[in-house]
Image (spheres, helix red, strand yellow):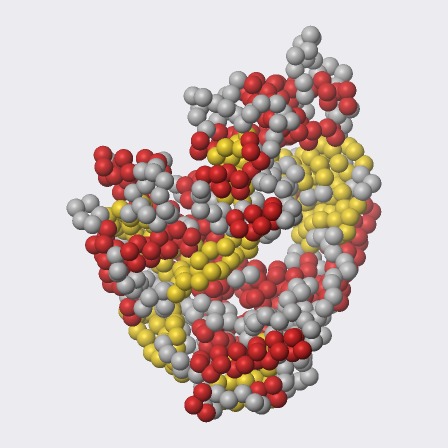
Amino acid sequence: MENLINHIVTNNLLFGKDKEERIVGAYQLSDTHIRLFNRNGDTVTFHDEPFYPYFFLSDSSLLETFVPENQEKFWLVPLAGSNYYTALAIFKSSRNHKNAVDFLNRKWNGNQAAQGEAAGKNSMESNPFMYNKGDTITQYLMQSGKTMFKGMLFDDIYRMQLDIETNYNGEKKGFYDDEIIIISLSDNRGWEQPLHSKGRNEKELLQELIAVIQEKDPDVIEGHNIFNFDLPYIQRRCERHSIPFTIGRNQTIPRTYPSSIRFGERTIDFPYCDIPGRHVIDTLFLVQGYDVAKRSIESYGLKNVARHFGFASANRTYIEYKDIARLWQEEPNTLLAYALDDVRETQALSSLLSGSNFYMTQMLPYSYAMTARLGQAAKIEALFVREYLREKHSLPKPTSGQQQSGGYTEVFLKGILGPIVYADVESLYPSIMLSYNVCPKSDALRVFPNVLRSLKELRFKAKDQAQQELQAGNKRNADNFDAMQASFKIIINAMYGYLGYSGGIFNDYGEADRVTTTGQGIARKMIAEFEKRGCKIIEVDTDGIFFIPPASIASEQEEKALVEEVSQQMPDGINIGFDGRFKKMISYMKKNYALLSYNNVMKLKGSSLNSRSAEKFGREFIRRGFQMLLAEDIKGLHLLFAEYKEKILNHQLSIEEFSRSESLKQTKEQYLEDVASAKRSKSITYELAIRKGMEIRKGDKISYYITGSGSSNFSWDKGKLAAEWDPNKPDENSAFYLKRLDEYSQKFLPFFKPQDYSMIFSTGSLFAFSEEGIELLKEIPNTDSQTE
C-alpha cells in the first residue's frame, strides 16, 4: 500500500506539484486571497493563501494599451515553444483580471464589427485572443499544483445527506409556496435526525437547519435532485422569512447560477449551488452518469434506484406525494420515518457511486463538486494545461476538421446461435496509443503519452492492491483501491475521444484516425485468426468479438486456450482476453442481441430491444418473447401475444405498464418559438405541461398515456398525465396500444417465414393455434457491414 501511495505522491504530472494533504474545501476570500480548509479527523482548520489570477494570451501586444485600476502591476510572461497562445498574463487581483478580460472582449468585438461580422461574442470561450477557463478555485489549484483530498480515503471526508418534505395538499400554487415541514439529515458516521416543524413554525425549522450545518461542518452535502429541488427550495423559503442562508463555511452564503450537465444525448439545465468551502453532490446526476453505459435503470427516482441497487430496506416506508399533507396531520411519525429512509438511501447511493469522482479529485485541479459534473474532455485538458503552465510553455488552439474513420463493426450472422464465446482486446485504443506512440502534434511536452502511461501503471497497481486487500479481509481498503483504479480507467478510456474532440486545444484528428484504422486492422486480423481455427464469427464491435467455436472445442478451458492462441498472433502490446461463454445468442442487429448464460439467465443488449422510450409492457413483451425464442417455444410465443392482447382489450394493464416518460430537450419558451416558426410540430409532453400550467425545465421528465379511440387517432392533444389515470374509469386508447403491440411483435419477424409469423402473432382464427410445420430460422447470413 505504501508503495502505491508513494508513487502517487511523487507523480507531479498526475497529482500536481504541491503535496499539501487533506484539503477538503476552498473559497475565494477576497480579491487577492483563497481560503483553504484542511480536515484532520473531526478537526477542520483553515489558512489563507495569495492568489494570482491569469490567462493565456495569443499575443502579449494585445494588452499594450490596457490600464489596470490603481495602476496595479501585472505581468506578461513569454512562453516557450511555438503554439498559438504565446504569453501568460498574470494579475495581482481578481478585479484587474476581470478588467483585462473585459478589455480583450471589447477588442475582439470591435474587430468582428470592423470585419462586418456579428458582434456580441462577449464570452471567454469564443474570444481567440485568450485561453481563460476555470473559476477562481480551479485557477488557484491549477497554478499552485494543489489538489483536494490528497492523503485521504473516501470515508475520511465528512458527508451529510439532506432531503426535504413540503406540506403539499394538492392545491395549485406557485412552486415555492408550500411550507417545508421536514428536513431529514444524516451523515456517513451514523448520525441521523429528522428536523421538523411540529410545535413550531417554518422559520424556526430553517434556523435550526442552518445551525446544525454550521455545527456539524460537513465537507460534502448530498441529496437526490438536490440542485433542482431541495437547495433552491430551502433558499427561497429562507428569503421569505428574511433568514440569511449562511450554510457555507465561516457563515458564508451560497452563490447560485444557471448550469447544465450532459448525459449521452440528453442535456439537463439546473441551478448550480456553490456553497463556499463545501461541495454539493447530486446523486440523481451520479445515477444518470452511471446509466449512460449500463442502460439498466428504468426510473431515476430515489425509491426505484434503491430497489435497483438492492439497498432498499425490507421495511422501507413508501408514501404517495399527494398523501403528505394528510399524513402530517394524522400520522406524523410515518412521514418522519419516510423522510429518514430517503436520506439513508441517498447515503448508500452516494457511497456506491462517488468513489471514482473522489479519487479523480485527488488528481485534478477541480473541486469535488466540479469533478462530479464535468465531462471527461475537460478533465483531460486540465491535466495538460496544468503541466504546460508549470513548464511555462505555450498552448495550442483547437485544430479544425473532422475524423475520417471509426471503429470496425460488422454482423456476419443473425439468428439463434450457439454455443458462444466472447473475447475482447484488452483496452484496445489505449493499448494502440501506447504501442504506436500516438501523440497530438501540438503536444510538444508529450504530456499525452506520459499521462496515459502513468495512468495505466497506476491502475494496474491499484487493481493488484485491491485484490490483495480483499484477500487479506480488508474490504474497506479494497473498496477504496477499486474506486481508485476505476477513476484511472475513466480517464484512460476517454483519452482517445479527446483526440477527436472539436473543442479540445490538443485535439488531433489525424492521430485519432490512426488509432481507429489501426484498430480496424487488428479487428480484421482477429477475425482471420479465429476463422483459420474453424470458428464462425457472429459479430465484431470495435474491440470485441462473438463467435461459435469449432465442434472440437467444448469446455471453458479449451475456449480460453483458443483465445490465448489467437492473442499470441496479435502485434506487440495487443492482448485478447476471454470475456465470457454463453449457451445461446440471438443475433438481432448491430449492437442488439440476447445472451443466454449456462445457468439459463438471459441478458438483452441494445436500444432496439430494450428502449427506454418504449412502454413498459412493450419492453416486457420483447424480453419474455426472446426467452421463448431461446427456448424454441413457438406455442409459448403465440400465447404470450394473446395474453398481452387480452390485457389491452380488457384494460388489465396498470398505468406504469402503458404510460411513457419523455425528457424535455428544450425550454418551454424555445418550444413555443419553434412551433410558431414551424421548425417543429406540437408535442404531447409540452402541450400537457402548458395545459396543466406546470413549471418545467429542460431535462425534466413527463409521464403520459394516450386516450381517445381508433389506432390512427393519435395526436398531440390526445395525451393525459399518467397521474390522472383512474383504474376505476380506465380511458386509455386500447386500439392505439394494440397497434403498439403489433409494432413490438415485428421484432420477431426475422426469425420466421412471413406466413408463419402471421399465424403466431394473431388471434381469433377459426382453428386452434398449432406450431406444427412452423420453422424457426436459426442461422441467417448477414451481408450488411458498417465501419463507424
**Is 405 situated left or right of 340 in this image?**
right
Q: Is residue 709 above or below residue 167?
A: above
Which residue is nearer to you in this view: 287 or 414?
Answer: 287
Residue 641 in view here: yes
Expressed as whole percent of the image width and height from the top left, the position of residue 644 reads 58, 22
Expressed as whole percent of the image width and height from the top left, the position of residue 310 reads 43, 41
Q: Is residue 659 above or below residue 189?
A: above
Residue at left 52%, top 53%?
268
Residue at left 65%, top 69%?
118
Name, please, the residue furthest toward the top: 766
Residue at left 71%, top 37%?
587
Q: Is residue 284 above or below residue 688?
A: below
Count of numbered circles on the image: 0
Expressed as whole percent of the image width and height from the top left, the position of residue 648 reads 56, 22
Which residue is nearer to you in this view: 120 or 246?
Answer: 120
Which residue is nearer to you in this view: 778 or 278?
Answer: 278
**Is 630 situated left or right of 313 in this image?**
right
Expressed as whole percent of the image width and height from the top left, the position of residue 633 reads 66, 22
Residue at left 41%, top 62%?
256
**Is 526 situated left or right of 741 in this image?**
right
Residue 738 in view here: no
